[in-house]
Image (spheres, rainbow, N blue to C red):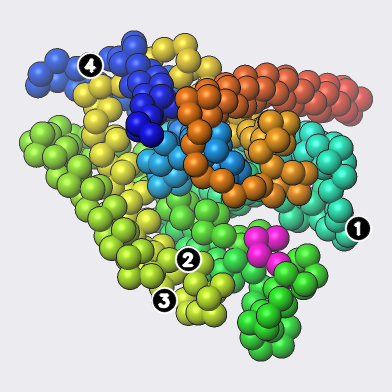
Amino acid sequence: MMAQIPIISIIVYASILALLLIGSKRAAFGQFNSDSMSLEACKNFQGLAAIGVICHHLSQPASNSAPMAALGQMQIFREIGFLFVAIFFFLSGFGLLKSLQTKPGYLKGFLRRRVLPIVICYYVMNIFYIVFHLILGTKMEASEWICKIVGLALLNDNAWFVPVIVVMYLAFYAAFKDGDRGRSYAIVFLVVAAQAGWFLFNKHFPWWLGEADWWKKPGALWMAPWYKRPVALWYEGEWWVNSTIAFFAGILAAKHEKKLFAFFEKAYWPKLFASILLFASSFVLRFFLQSKNVHYWLEFSGDNRTLPRAMMFGVESLQVLTGLLFIVLLRMKIWSRNRVLDFFGKYSLEFYLCQALFLRAFAILFGWMDKSFRSPENFALQGYGDQGMALLYMLLVFAATIALAIFLKAAVQKILSLFEKSDSKAKNAAA
């Protein structure tokens, strides 16, 4: 059988390249884009990250059936999903400190303006996932339903971003409410480190909860109460923490923005080339560790040591920092402004939270997995029809996610307006 042309790869990579080129703002030789970290540019940057995240999730086939296996052509996104999330954290940290520096009284009402919309968005989104699981007939204990409805556990496994970014926002508020001081930065860094430390200790499930090595007994892990099973509670999984260093990096970048960009402009091209080498080297180091069986999931083979995870976490943190350095340097010379990236930047949070629903719903509808999210094992592509079906699946996921994201944002805005009206009435009554 002749090798198939990777249609999905061609379409996806060509589309992203077009988005990066259309409306591109290129600085002339010897000059730089002075607005590469402006609010407009950052929203554009968020849009690119939002697209990258859903491509990452699409590259992790929800089914092993042939049409879904065609999505394996997007292998590169499987390896760099956390780097797109790092962009969100970096821009959040950068934007918060820039606003603090330029807007008098910025922290007054901060929790309502910045934290409350995220929390409301999470709970409105959760309603759709509750309905989805009720339709599927998902079986859960009452305690599990309660914890997942109130948010102590996640009904939508992609929604881990919400508790983490809320924790980071609260840390920023607590650290800077008394002014921009040296200890403020230390507080934020310690919160980032504490989250990473908890994962490195806890890993993917509470192995420490119960008798020693209870989870090593045959079948014990999957027969345990739901809250003791893998990835049931907060910070059980490396994706909760392996990009959060970017939030602190964003704060530092905002604090030293002028000095940093003045430094980068001197001998720019050697520094850009060095950033590329550093970024590439971080991948080489990561793949080397993986070849030596150093990864995050060793506890499932009985190895509960923290050191291997800490090594991998250190390398991925290096990937985040060198990747951000490369992108920031590159955008000093070229960044793109177009309606597509603007749109995804505007709806980035909503788009991020909605996608898991349709990734699974359409896979079930297409018969690629059952209602328990299990799928048949069949990796053999039968022809271009499989690629066509996988492409249709991608388009439907994108379209449905966009539609729900627009609705979700409108619903959140409506709820926030009700809060404002309530406050206004209370103030008028008090007067």
Residue that carries the numbered disc 2 in the rendered image: 296
Q: Which of the pair 175/70 is nearer the observer? A: 70
**Residue 420 higher or lower than 249, as above or below:** above
At label 1, the amino acid type is: Ala
Which numbered disc, 4 or 3, marks the residue closer to the eye?
A: 3
Q: Which residue is mark 3?
A: 307
At label 4, the amino acid type is: Arg
**Which residue of the protein is positioned furthest toward the bottom in this rendering?**
212
Q: CA distance from mark 3 to mark 1?
A: 37 Å
Residue 258: x and y in percent read: 26, 35
State how far apart marks 2 and 4 are (Cα).
Answer: 40 Å
For residue 30, above or below residue 231: above
Residue at point 51% right, 67% down?
A: 297
Decide which of tag 1 and tag 4 comes sooner along the chain.
4
The quarter of the picture where residue 75 lies is top left
Residue drawn where x is 48% and y is 65% of the image: 296
Where in the figure is residue 392, as x and y percent of width and height?
58, 22
Residue that label 4 marks:
26
Q: Is residue 320 on the magenta stretch?
A: no
Residue 332 horizontal side relative to residue 324, left or right: left
Q: Secondary structure at mark 2?
A: loop
Q: Residues within 10 Å of mark 4 (few under 14, many from 20)?
A: some
In the rendering, at what x and y percent does residue 377 appear? 59, 49
- Residue shown at 59% from the left, 34% from the top: 352
Q: Which mark is residue 142?
A: 1
Q: Residue at x 38, y 70 (%)?
A: 293
Mark 4 or mark 3: whose residue is earlier in sequence: 4
Magenta segment range? 228-233
